[in-house]
Structures are given as structure tokens and as C-alpha cells.
């Protein structure tokens, strides 16, 4: 039998949403959106210049507020990246200082010219951006060290999470790991590194499940499971549910221009 396959295939549903081929997404156009999002944060949200340290830690609360902390020191964690091999990144927060508490309703966009760590419970609608200038030669990433959950899945809560480069799921996440929101890696990928075979081997290498309720948008291939005959790092069960409410009402200031739209896919 032929080994050739179209770009999208399988036995899952809803297959009416599967399209191939489609026009390429112009991720470079989002670079222009960064400048607009920065201006919006300065006028109607929260703008954070370079911390001069490791970055910022955003902790959302179920009361509609969020605390911002400056990360002053980190510990490196080694993991495996399919593109670079074993790599040591400043993943775990060692020390930090609080710089303020804000309300989503009055500051619905956060723009950081630095790296970021994001976690907590979202009550309201907000977009979080980590990007540096000049955009074509700079890099900024986002770590997700813990669950990100909506206070309710009724359309009143939305999160857009945009990294200039990569979005990383941390090593020591909960064994039941949940993310609510639209995730975008503008010139990178959304991954969890491989923690195995001496490249960051850890008791937390394998987690029980990953659940994403929202959308995955990345320039490069996103991945989080590593196998060598059997699972050696990643998630035993993965479920990605597309949030249909994103199509007509995305998070505030989230880029939706261009020849693309959110699509739905589910992995188990």
C-alpha cells in the first residue's frame, strides 16, 4: 500500500474542520502586531520594560487580579530539545520580588520586554505578551510552571499567551496539567523538553495527563512526548480541546489579521 498521506489524516472528528493544503500563515506579520500591542499596553494595560534580571512572574487569582513579580534569580534545568539536543535553561524561579497587583478589568493586556513565567486562575479577559525589540533579532520565551485555569468555561474568561520565541511547559508541573487559553509561539514552538537518559532525568519526567482548552499556534512543530519503545518523558494522556468561543471573540488585542483562523484538533 502507498505510504503517502495528505497533511492531515486520522480517525478523529470533526473531520469537516480538517483542511489540506491551506495557505501558509504569515508569522512575520505578527512582528508588526508586537509594536501595536506594546502601544496598547502602555495606554490601556500594563507595560513592563526589561527587568534587568531574569524576567517577570505573572500569578493570576480567581478574584480577577494578578500579581507581578520580578524574577531576580533562577536555577537551570537540563532537558532535551529535538533541534539542539541537551540544553540547560534557566527554568526554576529561585528568588523574586513583588512589584504590584493589578486588575484584569482595568489592565487587560500585559506586554513584557522580557521572559515570563505565567500561572494561576483567570477571571476576565486578558492577553499576555513576552517580546523584545528589535523583533527580528530578539528572543523572549514564556514558561508555564503550573496550571492555568479559567474561573469558569462560560465565555466570560479568556487568555491569550504570546511568546516571541517559545512557550515551555516546565519539568515540575502537576501530574494533571491543565492549560486554558490560546497559545501562540510567534517564531518558535510550544514544547516540554525531554527529561530522560541522563539529559535531565527526573522523577517528574512522566506526568499523567495534559489538557489544553483553547488553541495551539506555533511557527515550528510543537511537541511534548518522548518515546523509546515506551513513554520516557511527557504525558500518558493528552487531550487538546479547541475553544470555539475564540473564533468570534478572541482575547483582547490578540492578533487575528491575515489569512488564517483557529482550527480544532484533539489528541488522546
Image (cartoon, grey):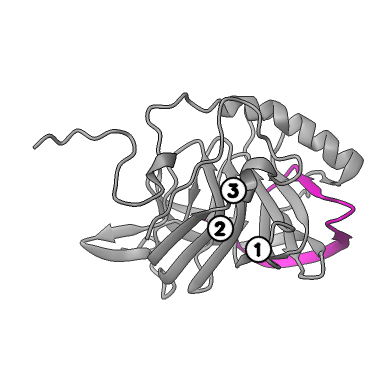
Q: Quadrant of residue 6?
A: top left
- Is 194 part of what is drawn in magenta? no
Please tell me how crowded label 3 is: few (under 14), some (14-19), or many (20+) other residues with Cα within 10 Å.
many
Q: Earlier in the sequence, mark 3 or mark 2?
A: 3
Which of the two marks, 2 or 1, is nearer to us in this view? 1
Q: Can you give x and y, in whole percent of width and height, for residue 86 in the image?
A: 40, 52
Please tell me how crowded label 2 is: few (under 14), some (14-19), or many (20+) other residues with Cα within 10 Å.
some
Q: Is residue 35 rendered to the left or right of residue 161?
A: right
Residue at the spot 91% in from the left edge and 39% down from the top edge: 43
- Cα gap from disc 2 to disc 1, whole angstroms: 9 Å
Circle 3 sits in a helix, a strand or a loop, which is it?
strand
Residue at the spot 60% in from the left edge and 67% down from the top edge: 147
Q: Out of 149 and 141, give the one closest to the viewer.
A: 149
Give the numbered dot on residue 153. Answer: 1
Marks 2 and 1 close (CB-CB < 8 Å) = yes
- Is 111 part of what is drawn in magenta? yes
Which of the two marks, 3 or 2, is nearer to us in this view? 2
Residue 201 visible in this rendered orientation of the protein = yes
Q: Which residues are magenta?
A: 89-115
Amino acid at each position: 500500500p502507498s505510504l503517502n498521506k495528505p497533511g492531515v489524516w486520522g480517525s478523529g472528528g470533526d473531520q469537516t474542520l480538517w483542511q489540506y493544503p491551506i495557505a501558509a500563515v504569515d508569522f512575520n506579520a505578527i512582528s508588526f502586531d508586537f509594536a501595536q500591542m506594546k502601544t496598547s499596553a502602555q495606554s490601556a494595560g500594563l507595560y513592563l520594560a526589561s527587568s534587568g534580571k531574569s524576567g517577570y512572574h505573572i500569578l493570576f487569582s480567581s478574584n480577577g487580579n494578578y500579581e507581578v513579580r520580578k524574577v531576580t534569580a533562577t536555577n537551570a534545568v537540563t532537558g532535551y530539545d529535538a533541534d539542539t539536543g541537551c540544553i540547560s535553561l534557566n527554568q526554576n524561579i529561585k528568588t523574586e520580588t513583588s512589584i504590584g497587583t493589578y486588575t484584569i478589568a482595568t489592565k487587560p493586556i500585559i506586554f513584557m520586554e522580557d521572559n515570563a513565567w505565567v500561572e494561576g486562575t483567570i477571571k476576565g479577559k486578558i492577553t499576555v505578551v513576552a517580546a523584545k525589540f528589535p523583533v527580528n533579532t530578539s528572543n523572549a520565551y514564556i514558561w508555564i510552571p503550573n496550571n492555568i485555569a479559567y474561573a469558569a468555561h462560560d465565555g466570560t474568561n479568556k487568555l491569550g499567551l504570546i511568546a516571541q520565541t517559545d512557550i515551555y511547559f516546565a519539568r515540575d508541573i502537576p501530574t494533571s496539567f491543565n492549560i486554558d487559553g490560546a497559545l501562540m509561539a510567534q517564531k518558535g514552538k510550544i514544547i516540554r523538553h525531554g527529561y530522560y537518559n541522563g539529559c535531565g532525568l527526573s522523577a517528574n519526567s512522566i506526568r499523567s495527563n495534559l489538557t489544553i482548552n483553547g488553541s495551539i499556534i506555533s511557527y515550528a512543530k510543537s511537541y511534548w512526548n518522548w518515546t523509546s519503545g515506551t513513554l520516557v518523558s511527557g504525558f500518558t494522556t493528552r487531550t487538546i480541546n479547541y475553544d470555539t468561543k475564540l473564533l468570534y471573540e478572541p482575547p483582547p488585542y490578540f492578533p487575528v489579521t491575515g489569512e488564517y483562523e483557529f482550527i480544532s484538533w484533539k489528541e488522546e
